[in-house]
Image (tube, rainbow, N blue to C red):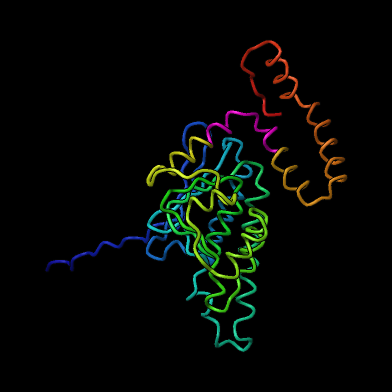
Amino acid sequence: MNAPPAFATTSPPPILLRETIAGGIAVLTLNRPAARNSLSLEMIGELQAALDLIGHDEGVRALVIAANGSAFSAGHDMKELTAHRNDADRGQASFTRIMNACSAMMQSIVNLPKPVIAAVQGVATAAGCQLVASCDLAIASEQATFATPGVDIGLFCSTPMVALSRNVPRKHAMHMLLTGAPVTAAAARDIGLVNRVVPAGTERAAAIELARTIAGKSAYTVKIGKAAFYRQAEMNLADAYRYASQVMAENMMAEDAEEGIGAFIEKREPNWKDR
């Protein structure tokens, strides 16, 4: 008697892809193209876990965040967000859990001791726009668009507002938040949301090239510089100068500062020790 045929089972593809390429560049790729790379709680958790690992990986000197499909990220998963409407608290505990997890993940990008570059190939809306704004740098395809359209569905983009308002002038941020209107890649560059606009299909390569340029610097210097940049930005002018003067004096004591200044004087390439 013949055995029944065996049916092969295939696991769903991972929702977040990670690769490390030459030069110490890590690339995280959002991989939910059918869901427009929406930031489900699972996706947020995967990003958080990856950021935690990369933060402690001395082999990684810079990080690129990219996405597969037509959208970079359409923001929160609306079906997941409203799945607990019938709970006794009408979903408030679930909403709080999702927003807190997302906010913590965005702060992890800012606090990561390595530069983070977004490679935006398509639409980045709501929390997707927040993700771009949370990165240190961003390269956008000429086909990319950006929006904070929560106002259109009665849910103001309050958490995306935090990152957006720290990237672009207030009136531009308010226009995006109050109208929900999309902003082209060129306009996003003009207001400071992205650094460069490149031909469609080249944004990932351009982001990796930029990451390699930064990865060629002292990792120690980049680490303290990134942390100092965000910290001083929240201070008044006098406090910022006091803090920055202290950071720079301490930086001068580093081996890489001694090596880099020596290399400059001697007209040679520095040999970084990352300390």
The quarter of the image holding the N terminus is bottom left
Residue, x 82% and y 50% (percent of image)?
235
Residue 56, position in %: x, y?
63, 43
- Residue at 71%, 24% in the rendered image: 256
- Of residue 132 and residue 186, the one placed in the foreground of this image is 186
Whether residue 140 appears in magenta in the rendering, the answer is no
Q: In the figure, is residue 154 to the left or right of 240?
A: left
Residue 154's x, y, as percent? 57, 79
Residue 27 percent coordinates (x, y): 49, 44
- Using the image as rendered, state which of residue 58 and residue 208 is in the foreground: 208
Quarter holding the C terminus?
top right
- Residue shown at 69% from the left, 38% from the top: 223
Q: Quadrant of residue 227?
A: top right
Q: Along the line of sight, which residue is nearer the eye, 174 or 54?
A: 174
Instruction: Decide: is 266 above or below 2.
Output: above
Give the residues drawn in magenta, as a range.
Answer: 211-223
In percent of width and height, residue 14 lies at 42, 57
Principal SS element in the magenta part?
Answer: helix
Rendered position, 275 above or below 127: above
Q: Is residue 213 magenta?
A: yes
Q: Tell which residue pokes out farthest to the top in this image.
A: 266
| Image vertical order of residue 186 relative to residue 101, above or below | above
Q: How many marks?
A: 0
* In the displayed structure image, the side of residue 32 where residue 55 appears, left or right: right
Q: Is residue 55 left or right of residue 3?
A: right
Q: Is residue 95 above or below residue 203?
A: below
